[in-house]
């Protein structure tokens, strides 16, 4: 194995979030309220399967053990099963996850599992079909819920469900969400709404502090769970009376970035050191042939020395990220 990816603050990177498309077929109010629009109107050319294999192999050689395949909506790729298979068959990768809006799960999740997908996150921002439609712009609630049921049917022991909490939309549904996971092995992940360049006013009206939610659940008997080295950013809590778990993702909490263990590669082959960082570092020119791997690793290692100690969300600075779909959330 090459040298473990590590930055100047001695944070080690075990987790790669790999975007394979920035196209999405939902129009979520906090991400793409006007629907997907190609940047500058250009026709997108996303990473090819051989390029994906090369970038994942380089990361695995440097200590990465978990890859999350993201979008946009990753299942829109016709070769999505092939991507899962390629990533899962890379030496050193033990976890292969995806984050999906779930609209294709009922029909395809069995194939994803067979291809090697080990973990699934599904976005479900409301348990009320009307509110779900209002938030996502799509009347697909029953379809998504059927997909979650199918995931359990084909053998997944746990499904993670992402809920972006918003003051004027779904905040009042927290009791319903908790009741939902009482008898289901679902990790319910409440995510703080994050400010990006295209939604400043929306953020101001709808941001809910995850710290307040944590105070409430701790008072009701929920207990913190020990983190693993390649876990994501969620603080996870369990309760003896619940089969499910709660995860809180709180990017505005002091010290959030201290445990950062993940890097991002965009669908067009740029390395992003932070979700709320710079324009990205080009990698694609070093993904054309296998023999470029040493140079690819060297470029990534060099760029890690410029990774900041923290994002600057507290200052109202979301960096160059126009919306969450642009580099895989």
Image: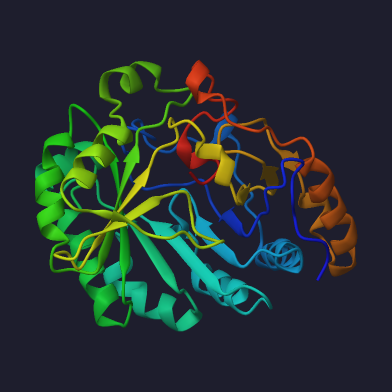
**Whether residue 29 can be seen here:** no
In-image side of 162 versus 72 (left or right): left
Name above or below for residue 47 compared with residue 119. above
The quadrant where residue 90 appears? bottom right
Along the line of sight, the residue nearer the viewer: 77 or 6: 6
Q: Residue at x 79, y 49 (%)?
A: 300
Along the line of sight, the residue nearer the viewer: 20 or 241: 241
**Whether residue 43 can be seen here:** yes
Q: Quadrant of the N terminus?
A: bottom right
The number of callouts visible is 0
In-image side of 216 versus 278 (left or right): left
| Colour logic | rainbow
Q: Residue at x 53, y 51 (%)?
A: 21
Q: Residue at x 84, y 48 (%)?
A: 299
Along the line of sight, the residue nearer the viewer: 218 or 36: 218
Q: Picture coordinates of residue 186 (x, y %)?
A: 25, 64
């Amino acid at each position: 194995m090459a040298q473990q990816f590590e930055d100047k603050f001695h944070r080690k990177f075990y987790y790669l979030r790999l975007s394979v498309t920035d196209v999405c077929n939902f129009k979520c109010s906090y991400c793409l309220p006007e629907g997907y629009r190609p940047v500058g109107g250009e026709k997108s050319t996303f990473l090819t399967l051989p390029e994906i294999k090369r970038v994942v192999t380089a990361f695995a050689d440097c200590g990465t053990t978990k890859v999350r395949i993201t979008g946009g909506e990753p299942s829109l790729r016709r070769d999505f099963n092939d991507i899962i298979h390629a990533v899962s068959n890379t030496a050193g990768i033990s976890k292969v996850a995806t984050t999906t809006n779930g609209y294709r799960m009922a029909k395809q999740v069995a194939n994803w599992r067979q291809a090697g997908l080990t973990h699934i996150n599904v976005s479900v921002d409301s348990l009320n079909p009307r509110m779900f439609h209002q938030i996502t712009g799509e009347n697909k609630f029953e379809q998504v819920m059927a997909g979650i049921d199918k995931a359990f049917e084909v053998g997944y022991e746990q499904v993670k469900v992402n809920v972006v909490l918003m003051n004027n939309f779904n905040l009042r549904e927290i009791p319903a969400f908790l009741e939902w996971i009482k008898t289901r092995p679902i990790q319910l992940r409440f995510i703080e709404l994050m400010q990006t360049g295209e939604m400043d006013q929306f953020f101001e009206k709808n941001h809910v502090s995850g710290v307040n939610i944590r105070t409430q659940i701790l008072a009701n008997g929920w207990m913190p769970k020990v983190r693993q080295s390649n876990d994501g950013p969620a603080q996870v809590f369990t309760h003896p009376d619940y089969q499910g778990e709660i995860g809180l993702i709180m990017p505005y909490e002091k010290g959030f970035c201290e445990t950062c263990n993940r890097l991002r590669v965009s669908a067009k082959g740029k390395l992003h050191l932070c979700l709320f960082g710079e324009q990205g570092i080009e990698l694609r020119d070093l993904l054309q042939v296998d023999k470029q791997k040493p140079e690819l690793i060297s470029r990534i290692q060099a760029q890690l020395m410029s990774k900041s100690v923290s994002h600057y969300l507290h200052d109202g600075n979301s960096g160059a990220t126009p919306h969450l779909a642009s580099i895989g959330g």
